[in-house]
Amino acid sequence: MTKIFSADLPITQAFKLTSRLRKLNDSGDTFCQRLNLFVAAILFILSFLSYGVDVILAKDNEGVSVYCYCPAEFPTSRVHFTNSVCFTKGFYYLPFDEPLSIPESLRAVNDNDKDNEDELLKYYPWVSHILLLQATLFCIPRLLWSLGAIREGFHHVSAIDMMDRHIFGDKDNDNELKSKGVNNIENYLTRLIQLRDSAICNSKLLPFIPTGYCYTVWFMATEFLMIGNSVSQFYLLDFLLGINFTRFGIDYLSQVPNLLWEDHSRFPRTAFCDLKIRQHTNIHTYTVQCALPSNMLNEKIFLLVWVMLLSVSAMNVLSFLHHLYTIQQMHLKTVEKINSYQLRTYFDTEKVGNVLTVKRFVYEYLKSDILVYLWQLSKGHKPLTDDVTHRLWNRYVGGLNGEVQEEEEVCVKRM
C-alpha cells in the first residue's frame, strides 16, 4: 500500500502540493482584492447564520422571531396576530425608568405621517438580507476588475496557468516546460502590443485614456472603488439599520473596561410596539412589550461587521497609496533591470543598448499596461517574468537592428 505520509516525502512534492492549493486562489489579485473577497465570504456566512437563527426562533411562533407580552384578555389567535403585526411594523426602544407613553415623534407615525417613521427600529426582519447585500457589494469591485481586464485583452488565469505548468511537470522536462511557458507568455504579450499599436485597436473600456494606459487606469480605479465601497457601507448601514452605526463600535468598545454594555437603544433586547385593532366602528390602541431574542446575535454580528469595515477601509487606503507609488516607480525599475541584464549578458560594452533605446523600450514599447501586467504576474513567478521581460527586450532590439539593416540595403540599392 502506498504511504500517504512518510518521512522521506521529498520537499519538492510538498512544494508542488502547496503551489497547487495556492493556485486555486491565485489569479493575479492583490492582497486587498483577496481580503475584500474574504470579507464578502464572512458576510455571506453571517447572513446565513442570522437567517438560520431566525428560522429556529420562529419555528414554534407562527413564523416570526418576536415574542410580545399581550393583555390577558387576548386569545391565542390575537397573540399571534400581535406578534406578526409588530414584526412587520417595527419597534421603538424606551428605557424602563421612563414613563410608558407613546413618544411625540411616534404619534405622528400612528396617524400615518411618514416623516417620523425613522424613529422605529425596522431592521429586525431584514438583518440577513442586509448582510447579503453587503457581501454582494464587496464582490462587485472584483467582478468589474475581471471583466475590465478581459475586455482589455489581459487574461490572468491563462498566463499564470502557463507559468505553473513547469512546476507540476516532470523533473526531467522542467527546463523544457519552463522555456515553453516563457515563450508562450512572450508571444502572448507581443500580440497584445501589436494589437495595441495597430490603428484598429482602441480601448473599448476607457476610450478617453491614452493607448497603453487603460489597463493601469482601470486597475487603480478598481482599487479606488474598493475604498469607496468599504467606507460608504458605514453610511449605508446608518440608513438601513436606522441607527448611528458609524459610532456603534466606538461606543461598544468604550464599555469593555466596565464589562458592561448599557446602551440598548441600537439593538434592544426588549422594545415596545403600538398597534391598533379595529372592531366594527371601534378602534382600540394597544402598547405591548416584545422580546427580540435575535438582537443578542445581531449586536455581535454588527460589531464584527464594524471592525471588519474599519480594518478593510484602512487596508484599502494603504493598498491604493502603495500601488500608486509602485506604478510610478515601475518604469525606472524596469530600465534599471534591463541595464543590469545587459551588463550581465554582454561583456562587450559596444553591444549594450544605449540609455535612450532602453527608455524607448520601456516607455514607448511596453508602456504602463504591460509593466503592470508583468508586475502582477511576478507574484510567485518573478524569475519567469524576468525572463519574459528579457526576451521582449531582445525581440525589440532585434527588430530595431532588422529595420536598420533594411534601411541600409535600400540606400545601397539607390546608390
Image (spheres, grey):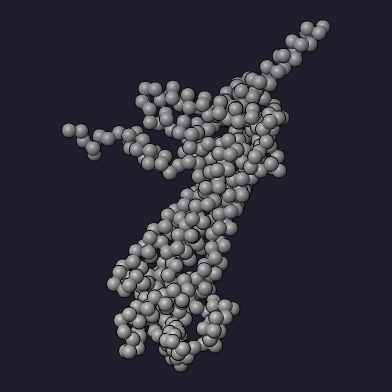
Q: Residue at x 78, y 7 (%)?
A: 413
Count of all numbered marks drawn on residues in the image: 0
Q: Nearer the viewer, residue 384 or 355?
A: 384
Residue 27 place in picture, x, y as percent: 48, 41
* Side of 386 relative to 20 (left or right): right
Confirm whether residue 341 shows in the render.
no
Residue 49 place in picture, x, y as percent: 36, 62
**Rendering quarter of residue 363:** top right
**Rendering quarter of residue 258:** bottom left
Q: In this view, does 191 lie above or below 324?
A: above
* Side of 146 relative to 330 (left or right): left
Q: Nearer the viewer, residue 369 or 281?
A: 281
Q: Which residue is drawn at 72% across and 14% down?
A: 406
Q: In this view, does 26 lie above or below 173?
A: below
Q: Residue at x 61, y 48 (%)?
A: 220
Residue 177 place in picture, x, y as percent: 43, 25
Q: Which of 231 and 17 is in front in this view?
A: 231
**Residue lying furthest bottom:** 99
Residue 312 place in picture, x, y as percent: 51, 58
**Residue lying furthest right:** 415
**Residue lying furthest left:** 1
Classify the position of the N terminus by image quarter: top left
Classify the position of the C terminus by image quarter: top right
Confirm whether residue 235 shows in the render.
yes
Q: Which residue is drawn at 67% across and 25% down?
A: 353
* Side of 293 relative to 370 (left or right): left
Q: Is residue 1 above or below residue 216?
A: above
